[in-house]
Image (cartoon, rainbow, N blue to C red):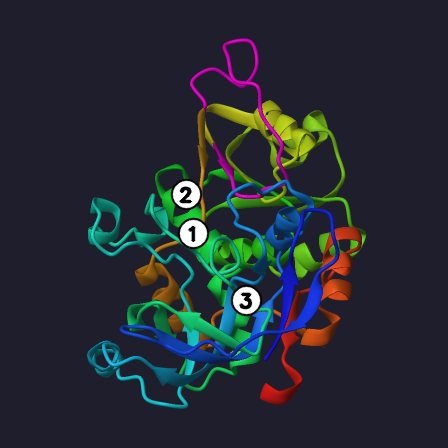
Amino acid sequence: MLAARLHAVGEPLRLEEVEVPEPQGTQVRVRVAGCGVCHTDVHISDGTMSRVELPLTLGHEVAGWVDKWGAGAGSGLRAASIRAGDPVLVFGGWGCGDCPECSSGQEQRCAEGRSPGFQADGGYAEQLLVPDARHLVPLGSLDPVRAAPLADAGLTPYRAVRRAGPWLEGGARVLLIGLGGLGQFALQYLRRLPDLHVAVRELDPDKVSKATELGADTGLLDGDAELVRDWLGGAAKVVFDFVGSDDSLALAGAVVATDGLVMLVGEAGGHLRFGFDSATVETWLTTTAWGSLDELREVVRLARRGALHWSVEPMPLDQAQAALERVATGPVAGRIVLVPTGNS
């Protein structure tokens, strides 16, 4: 089968013919319909992201059809009402299944976890081997190519907004930095909550217009901390940083209110100096990564009800390097999704 693999940091992806994986035990093989191209993939390829094992097939936003499974997977598939050929979304937080994090439903935080596109081969390929049927979410009538970004671009901001819930009371001022694939979902989740004033700060004028379309109260093109506070009408109770650079974090630290929250989601490798002379006093700073399996199921339920809006741009799998370069160097309106030619 064809796969796009990274062999060394800074090198282009290599399109290679590799053996089709054969599922054993509880493993399930998924015939890939589409795999989203994420900024995290860029950070993996340029070395910013260190939690990876090379060589590696990239891709963690994967949807497709159940193709084959090992002898121990049948009961899990039956419990999930999944049959051969069913369209599924792949949950990427592949934990050990036994530790306290996994037992509590937070498998994505497992210290021994191995996730697709990070430590295990991912979805830039024609087939993907999933370790257990519990990592599959039925898609029902959703198109798996269109649904692929829900596995991260839809899930990660859902968790971020949910975790910020105690700060998102009526009347709260909220700043969202970056309206890329994840930020567009985050804005939609925020608009489902009552009485928030939400501003989006972007460097791309087209995305500022998109922010207004998706319901932002204010769209700011660039803008320093003083301008952001002016447009918000004061300091922000919550700042969601979907960029994660030094500059975006500095802005977040400068505009967050006392007892406010900075939620770092973007993984551009930036840092925020923390101390009494930097971020606002008694500020809460946290990170978020991915989400739980139950949260992914809820995202899929929202998508199936038509409550979420997102756009995808399919590209052939053999253009994986070109897709990665586009995400790295230029604006992408929605999410590029790599589609294996033989699987479409």
Neighbourhood count class around disc 2 (C-alpha, 10 Å): few under 14, some 14–19, many 20 upward? few
Q: Which residue is drawn at 66% across and 85% down?
A: 341
Q: How far apart are marks 3 and 1 (CA)?
A: 26 Å
Do the numbered discs 2 and 1 sit on residues whose CB atoms are within 8 Å?
A: yes
In the image, what residue occupies the spot 40% across and 37% down?
167
Residue sitting at x 57%, y 58%: 56
Res 316 seen here: no
| Residue 49, horizontal then vertical, whole percent | 58, 43
Residue 132: image x %, image y %? 31, 69
Q: In which quarter of the image is the C terminus?
A: bottom right
Q: In this view, does 142 lie to the left or right of 73?
A: right
Tell me the element at label 2. loop
Disc 2 versus disc 1: distance between alpha carbons? 6 Å
Q: Is mark 3 on a helix, strand or loop?
A: helix
Camera-nearest residue between 200 and 108: 108
Question: Label 2 belongs to which residue?
Answer: 170
Mark drawn on residue 149: 3
Magenta span: 262-283
Check residue 281 for magenta coloring.
yes
Q: Is residue 285 visible?
A: yes
Q: How crowded is mark 1: few (under 14 residues within 10 Å), some or many (20 or more)?
A: few
Q: Residue furthest top?
A: 277
Q: Where is residue 216 in the image (x, y as percent from the top left)?
A: 61, 52
State the predominant SS element of the stretch in magenta: loop
Please state, as top left, top right, bottom left or bottom right, where the N terminus lies in the image.
bottom right
Counting residues from the start of the chain, the first of labels 3 and 2 encountered is 3
What kind of residue is marked 1? Pro
Residue position for label 1: 194
Whichever of callouts 3 and 1 sits on the residue coming sooner in the sequence is 3
Kind of residue at disc 2:
Gly
- Identify the element where label 1 is drawn: loop
